Amino acid sequence: MSNENLKAKVAEYNAKVEKAAAKFPERKNLPEQRIYTPVDVEGLDYDRDLGLPGSYPFTRGVQPTMYRGRFWTMRMYAGFSTAEESNKRYRYLIESGATGLSCAFDLPTQIGYDSDDAISTGEVGKVGVAIDSLADMEILFDQIDLGKVSTSMTINAPASVLLAMYIAVAEKQGVSADKLNGTIQNDILKEYAARGTYIFPPKPSMRLITNIFEYCSKNVPNWNTISISGYHIREAGSTASQEIAFTIADGIAYCDAAIKAGLKIDDFAGRLSFFWNAHNNVLEEVAKFRASRRVWAKVMKERFGATNPKSWMLRVHTQTAGSMLTAQQPENNVVRVALQTAAAVMGGTQSLHTNSKDEALALPTEDSVRVALRTQQIVAYESGLADIVDPLGGSYYVEALTDQIEKEAWEYIKKIDEIGGAVTAIEKGYIQKEIQDSAYKWQMEVEKGDRVIVGVNKFQIEEKPVEGLLRVDASVGELQKKKLADLRAKRDNGAVQDKLAALEKACQDESVNLMPLILDAVKAYATLGEICGVMRKVFGEYEAHVNL
Amino acid sequence: MEKRIRVLVAKPGLDGHDRGAKVVARALRDAGFEVIYTGLRQTPEQIAEAALQEDVNVVALSLLSGAHPHLFPRVVELVKGKGMTDVLFVGGGVIPDADIPALKDAGIAEVFTPGTPTSAIVEFINANVK
């Protein structure tokens, strides 16, 4: 049948069902059409727009075999309390079949304060593990072979320091830096825009990031030097298109900065990785993953002139949407996470963290983390979703939606280019405002009932308080303080002062790569707070301006 | 014309999650309140000073990091220490039910947990502001 005939038939169908549909109450936030047909993918050119997995533009996946080769890395984000406690959880996860580690750090660590700093009171060990010095890092990875495991660290402003600690621990284990596998998040732009754990202003922050790119390309070649993150942008309330658009705009800014610092695109682009959110709307999410790969491939090839195919690939870690978990009837979250997992897998993620059902209430217990990990294993081994590559490729709707999300993403990227790039757009508050507006719209839709959240604004029940939640012992702060006092008493303080002074001097000279100096300070057992303190002194601190 | 209710929406501690605080701030403003948002990473001392300077009727604290048992009572203590004894304190965020009684004892009039409609916060403030 020709498309002209089909168009007429679709029109006829729509006219016929319009009347029947009018009998039902109107649901909000639906796709424009109720059915998608070949008419909606008329312009699709298979080679140009999809291609085969492992080849440009990677719409169908970055590896040729995808999960027929091996499954995604099942990587559970974990960390709380002390290094000793978190080490136990990591070893439990590895025994349970997790194939990579993912470290959560507490807020003082993420913002470069020691546990004994007054500002850290009440926060130590709460949302992640407290790391004050190399001594804590040695405990965190005790009996874990850094030559075998791949480790992702959610650390941004002080990423250079934590990476240096990781390299130093590996060295003590007898593992050389070129054997290390893992990722640091190291994405400061989304900290300003959405996540909030920034320290320094954009300029020195971008310098630190490009220093890491350069250092790793020579010394830690298998390390993913950045995880350019849409996850938190989405958590802060953005739409799917905004998530990938703002993140890819950030990615462009990092490439620009690295090129300006004298690096060549193909020397670092292959180590850039991304981080997406797996939200509730399964088909929209699958389309988002596919669209994001196509957009990034074009950016790298057409805009930056990258010639190494590895530079064109958008490799992505995914986490299920924490903001979509409900505190009400928390068992329902197991189902939400299963659907989000399905979306991430059909979207072709390279690694995945699944949230636990109790995370709208507290950090997860060991039992609920097991269910979350089992969810991935069930999708991998039982559901069939991982049995063929890009199972939804060719779906009229998913292809049309992939095109639409790509189009919306380009519009945002163009707009951000016009503003002067992602750094300027963030400094002007443009990206933050767009995210806030989407978050507010979502909340109002929920409150009006236009958007149903099961158990929250529909199908509610009287509930008993949830029992058995994980509680972080309040004594962690005191324990860390004591460890720090011991450390400061027994280390060679003269050496620490020398290394910190050398770092301070280097910070003042933009042409110096800071990584080796940070590594020296870390090895002398300078604390995270001391190292970041030196950088604060030279670089100053970022001040956010909020427009409600 | 009656004086509008003035609300300070504040983020104590190091927590960077401000989606909720910003949505609530905007909803309160749309409900006709005067809203001042502090931005991230405010110490209890800074929040108390802002409450005094802005002469607010309500202090709304948002925290998702788990540091509320320390930080919320500290803010109440410091604000009251400035002689502002009529201020209504409310809190929100990821706060386990088990922690709520202690926060109420410390002077937080109500704690709004995830899933609360902003309209419930507006109603509570209207009914309880002094």
Image: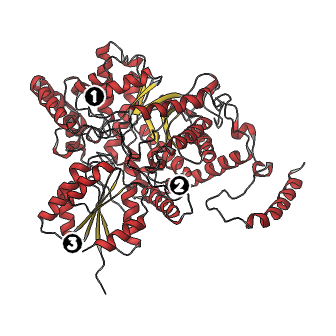
Q: Is residue A487 left or right of residue B33?
A: left
Which mark's residue is nearer the viewer, 2 or 1? 2
Is residue A46 or residue B41 the one in the foreground?
B41
Q: Which residue is mark 2?
A: A453
Q: Position of residue A540 (x, y in %)?
A: 24, 47
Q: CA distance from mark 3 to mark 2?
A: 38 Å
Q: Can the viewer see residue B15?
A: no
Asked if the residues shown at circle 1 and circle 3 are in contact, with their CB atoms under 8 angstroms apart, the answer is: no
Numbered disc 3: what chain?
B
Q: Position of residue A294 (x, y in %)?
A: 62, 41
Identity of the amino acid at label 3? Asp
What's the mark number on residue B55?
3
Identity of the amino acid at label 1? Ala
Is residue A305 or residue A164 the one in the foreground?
A164
Along the polypeptide, which appears first: circle 2 or circle 1?
Answer: 1
Q: Position of residue A322 (x, y in %)?
A: 45, 45
Q: Which residue is mark 1?
A: A83
Numbered disc 1: what chain?
A
Q: Position of residue A402 (x, y in %)?
A: 65, 46
At label 3, counting other C-alpha atoms closer than 10 Å, the crowd grade (few under 14, some 14-19, many 20 or more) is: some
Identity of the amino acid at label 2? Ile
Asked if the residues shown at circle 2 and circle 1 are in contact, with their CB atoms under 8 angstroms apart, the answer is: no
Q: CA distance from mark 2 to mark 1?
A: 37 Å
As helix, strand or loop, the secondary structure at mark 1 comes to helix
Q: CA distance from mark 1 to mark 3?
A: 44 Å
Q: Is residue A324 left or right of residue B89?
A: right
Total numbered badges shown on the rendered structure: 3
